[in-house]
Structure formats: C-alpha cells, structure tokens
C-alpha cells in the first residue's frame, strides 16, 4: 500500500476540519424517533477507532449516515476538509452480513471485484487484470482457495473476510466496518485485525463498530462511546478508564468485565 | 399445414412470442434478484389505461403511441402512489396495490365504453393476448413485417444493449446498493432505469401475451435460471434461453396440440406459453443439479456418507 495523495501536505498544521474524517452536528431520526443527537467526532490518519455502545445506541446508523445510506436531518461529513460526496472513492464500507442476499449468483471473486468497479468506471467491463487484482485481495485475507465458490457456500468468517477483501480492493482512505468481528472464529478475528492494523500503519483511517469491550484496548487506538449522543471519545485508554463506559452500559457492565457480542 | 400457411400464420406469431418472452425475461432476471417481481405485475397493469388512451387519441395502434401512453400512465401511477403514501398514510405495498388495480380497472372500463378501440384491442386481448392476429400477409416481403414484431425487436435490442453496457452497474446496485452508491454508480438511477425497462418490455409484450400472463414471462424464466446457475451472466443467458424455448413449445402446443387429438380448434397461445413456463419451473425445482429438490436430497445423503 502506498501513501495517499489526498493527505494534506506535510508541515501544514492540521485543524480538526482537515482530518481524514470529521463528522459535525449529525442528527438522524427514523420517522419521529431520533437515533443520533448532535454527534460530533473526528478520526486521524493512522487511527483505529472502535465505535462502542449498548444495543440501539445508533452505532450502525452512524456509519450508514456517514456514507449517506441513512438520510441525515442535519450535520456535515467532511473528508480531508471537503464535503464528503458518495462516489469520490475515499470511503470503503463493510456492511453487516445480514444486509446482503447470500443466494445472489456471484462467486467470492465476483464480489471482491465489485470493489474495483469504481476504478473501472461506467460501461467498461471487468478485465483479466481486475480479476487478478481481486484474487490478490482474496489471497491477502486467506481466501484465495474459495475464490470460485458461490458466496452462500462460505462460512460466516469467510464471508466477513470476503467483505474485508472487497474493501481492500477499493483502496480507500477511510474504512468503515460494521461489526466485522461478529460471529467469526478466533483465526479470522486475528487475521482481520492484523489487516486493519496494517492499513492504519499505512496511514489509512479505520472506524469499526465493535462489541467486545475486553479486546477494546488491545485492538484499537481510539474509541467512540455512543448512546444516541457521543458519551465519550478519544484515545482508547482514556475512554476505558472513564466512568462513563460502565455507566453507559448500565447495570450490565462491571469494572473490567467485558460485554459479549449480541 | 402448408408452408404458405406457416409463413403467414405461425412464423410471425412464433417470432412475436419469442421476442416478447425474451425481452421480459431479460429484465425479469434483475427484478427477481432484487425481489421486485411484483413490480412487473404492477407495471403491466398500470400501463393499460395508457395504451387504451393512446389508441383513443391517435386512432391507431402504433408502437410509439402506446409507449408514450404507457409512459404517461406510469407517471400518473408514480404520482398517485406517492400521494397515497404521503396523504393516505399507506405503506408502499398497499399504495401500489390500490393504484395498480384501480388503474387497470380504469383501462378496462375505457375499453368497454369506447368503440374507437374496437378492432384494435378489446378486453379479450388484455387477458389472452393477440398472438393470433399477428400476420405476415406477404411472406418474403420485409416491408410487410408485422408492426408488433418490429416494435418488439427494437425494444429487445435496446434492452439487450443496456443490459450489456450496464451489466456491472446492474450487478453491484442489485447486490449491494450501499457499495454502488459509494462507488458513484447512482443506484437509484439504476433502479429507475430498471422500472422504465420493465414498462417498455411490458408494453411491447402486451399485444403478444396480454397484461395478465406477461407476469409469467417476467418471473418464470429467471426463476428456472436461478435453479440452474450461480453466475449472474449465465443467469441472464439461461433465463433468455428458457424464455425462447417456452415461447416456441407453448406456441406449438397451442397451434398443433389439439390437432393431435383430432380437434380442429387451437388453444390460446399466451396461455400455453405461460403453462409451459410453469412446467419448466416445476421441472427445474425438482431436477436442477445443485438446487433441485430431488437431486439435492441425494447429494446431501452422499455427502453425509462421504468423509470431508
């Protein structure tokens, strides 16, 4: 992975608004029910941010609102200081497994190649070099052997790795992942986190909806504690140490105890 | 049956049926994958008052006129559905159901009351199609090719061209609209284009198979293909092939089937085509190599006994 061209020139002082991802005054409602209130957060290049919070806290909605999949009542999403436009190639998004049709007639390779469609552009067909590139991405997540399998035949962990490979193929600046570790085995979890760390080390910005408080400090550099509004945000150590974590999770959380997924 | 008879009566009807079924099944594959098969039903009903209106206004049944009429009807329908959702507080499915049955009824009423439409279309055509009226009066004369065949060929060529050019865009916006949007592919635009294509196919096929049975052409062949393949491009090709086979077999059953039993009559071809589609669907559900009910059971048994 090479460094990005979109990173502001070195030596220039970075204001918050020039960060890779800056979300400001975000309000989202489903019908008359508000889900996110005035959410503001930013993520720096090379950071790995976990979005944590109880069920119904709006974690998935936050990611979907950022990419414009959920209508925003108000608020801005800025990418490197510019208004984010879907289609500008800066953001890759890994959805929750439940949202796609696993009976769709496509192989793992076909789905990963979809990550390259933006580069290929309108009208133009997928060529051999694109398929080779998609296969490289599958290899990176350890799934090259299953490239030709129909996606419904993949296990839960394999499906998640396929989506990560697709995000890699997009070669974006910002990666938003909605529970990529939900329901995966330990080997897959390690593999996905290694890849995400490599991306962060290469200066990319990673935001992950995460459930397991036990691994929070081990995996992430930053955390965003969400419960409708931003309760706490910043370096992961500070968020874990703060009293708000256990308060937000209510009586289910006790100091030092993890909250399992689901 | 003489060759002359075949060229005048049967060949144009077969061509019309094949073109209509292929056009519908081409669009149908994407509708089925998007779980929007009902859309084809809705669109084919909604366009009826448009088609009848076009005939009333222009006094003739021409391809361009009925396409224009259908477009107007579709726009009215979209506006009515949005109005019902906003003012009537109905959910999308209920709003659609209300609008498309009402507009269909209006279309039938227009047919019944107006005598201008007589000789062009009547209520029977809506139900049965009018394959039997497609005649090539002077076989060999290409300028006398029936209008229905020309319309269908043009529509099919456009739809096939679009599916070829936008294969990638259709695939990604169908499988994962969120990704399509992030990649700049405007999934809503693709969705609108698909509805428009559905309407064009439904209107072009209207004369061949009517408004009711056309749903079988949209949904049946793609469902057969779903049982047979795991590749999107193959899905589209198999679906088109099944549609063509069903059209030919269905027509042959209608035209020549009763003769085998000594009956001088023939059956309605649109009906037998729809039945053929249904039989093919049943066969594919039973005998498809991977997903068919019978072979899948046997595969499960053998894979249980085999060590992995």
Image (spheres, rainbow, N blue to C red):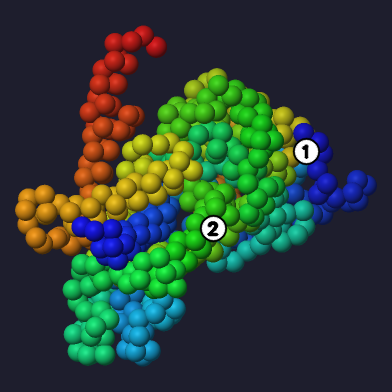
Q: Quadrant of the N terminus of chain B?
A: bottom left
Output the chain of dot 2. B
Q: In the displayed image of the protein, which residue is found farthest to the right? A: A11
Residue B281 placed where, x, y %? 26, 44
Residue B230: quarter of image: top left
Residue at image mark 1: A203
Residue found at x 70% / y 41%: A171
The disc label shown at residue B43, or none = none
**Front residue of this view, candidates B94 and A242:** B94
Residue found at x 63% / y 43%: A126
Residue A87: quarter of image: bottom right
Q: Is residue B71 above or below residue A191?
A: below
Q: In the displayed image of the protein, which residue is found farthest to the left? A: B262
Residue B267: quarter of image: bottom left
**Horizontal arrangement in the rendering, residue B52 relative to residue B260 (left or right):** right
Residue B260 placed where, x, y %? 11, 49
Could one spot residue B42 in this view of the protein? Answer: no
Residue at image mark 2: B161
Number of other residues with Cα within 10 Å of mark 1, as a class: few under 14, some 14 to 19, many 20 or more = many
């Amino acid at each position: 992975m090479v460094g990005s061209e979109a990173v502001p020139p070195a030596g220039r002082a970075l204001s918050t608004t020039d960060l890779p991802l800056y979300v400001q005054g975000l309000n989202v409602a489903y019908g008359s029910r508000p889900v996110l209130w005035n959410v503001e957060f930013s993520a720096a290049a090379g950071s790995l941010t976990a979005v944590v919070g109880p069920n119904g806290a709006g974690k998935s909605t936050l990611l979907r609102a950022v990419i414009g999949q959920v209508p925003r009542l108000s608020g801005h999403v800025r990418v490197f200081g510019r208004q984010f436009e879907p289609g500008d190639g800066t953001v890759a998004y890994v959805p929750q497994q439940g949202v796609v049709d696993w009976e769709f007639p496509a192989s793992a390779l076909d789905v990963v190649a979809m990550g390259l469609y933006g580069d290929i552009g309108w009208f133009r067909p997928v060529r051999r070099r694109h398929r080779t590139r998609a296969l490289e991405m599958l290899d990176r997540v350890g799934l090259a052997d299953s490239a030709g399998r129909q996606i419904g035949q993949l296990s839960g962990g394999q499906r998640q790795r396929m989506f990560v490979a697709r995000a890699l193929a997009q070669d974006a600046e910002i990666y938003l992942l909605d529970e990529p570790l939900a329901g995966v085995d330990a080997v897959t979890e390690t593999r996905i986190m290694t890849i995400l760390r490599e991306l962060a080390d290469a200066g990319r910005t990673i935001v992950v909806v995460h459930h397991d408080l036990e691994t929070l400090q081990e995996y992430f550099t930053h955390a965003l504690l969400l419960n409708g509004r931003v309760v706490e945000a910043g370096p992961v150590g500070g968020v874990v140490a703060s009293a708000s974590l256990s308060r937000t999770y209510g009586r289910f959380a006790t100091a030092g105890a993890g909250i399992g997924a689901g | 049956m003489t060759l002359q008879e075949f060229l005048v009566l049967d060949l144009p009807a077969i061509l019309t049926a094949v073109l209509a079924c292929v056009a519908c099944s081409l669009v149908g594959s994407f509708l089925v994958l998007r779980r929007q098969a009902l859309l084809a039903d809705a669109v084919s009903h909604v366009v009826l008052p448009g088609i009848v209106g076009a005939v009333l206004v222009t006094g003739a049944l021409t391809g361009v006129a009925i396409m224009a009429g259908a477009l107007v009807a579709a726009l009215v329908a979209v506006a009515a559905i949005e109005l019902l959702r906003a003012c009537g507080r109905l959910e999308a499915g209920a709003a659609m159901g209300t609008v498309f049955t009402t507009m269909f009824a209006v279309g039938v009423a227009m047919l019944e009351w107006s005598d201008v439409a007589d000789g062009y279309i009547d209520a029977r055509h809506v139900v049965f199609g009018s394959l039997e009226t497609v005649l090539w009066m002077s076989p060999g004369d290409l300028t006398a090719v029936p209008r229905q065949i020309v319309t269908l060929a043009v529509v099919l060529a456009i739809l096939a061209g679009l599916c070829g050019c936008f294969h990638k865009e259709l695939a990604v916006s169908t499988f994962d609209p969120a990704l399509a949007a992030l990649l700049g592919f405007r999934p809503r635009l693709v969705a609108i284009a698909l509805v428009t294509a559905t309407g064009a196919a439904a209107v072009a096929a209207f004369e061949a198979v009517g408004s009711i049975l056309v749903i079988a052409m949209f949904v049946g062949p793609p469902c057969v293909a779903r049982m047979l393949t795991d590749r999107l491009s193959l899905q589209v090709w198999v679906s088109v092939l099944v549609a063509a086979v069903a059209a030919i077999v269905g027509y042959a059953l209608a035209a020549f089937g009763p003769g085998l039993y000594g009956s001088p009559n023939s059956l309605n071809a649109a009906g037998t085509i729809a039945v053929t589609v249904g039989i093919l669907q049943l066969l594919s559900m039973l005998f498809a190599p991977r997903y068919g009910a019978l072979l899948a059971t046997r595969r499960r048994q053998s894979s249980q006994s085999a060590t992995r």
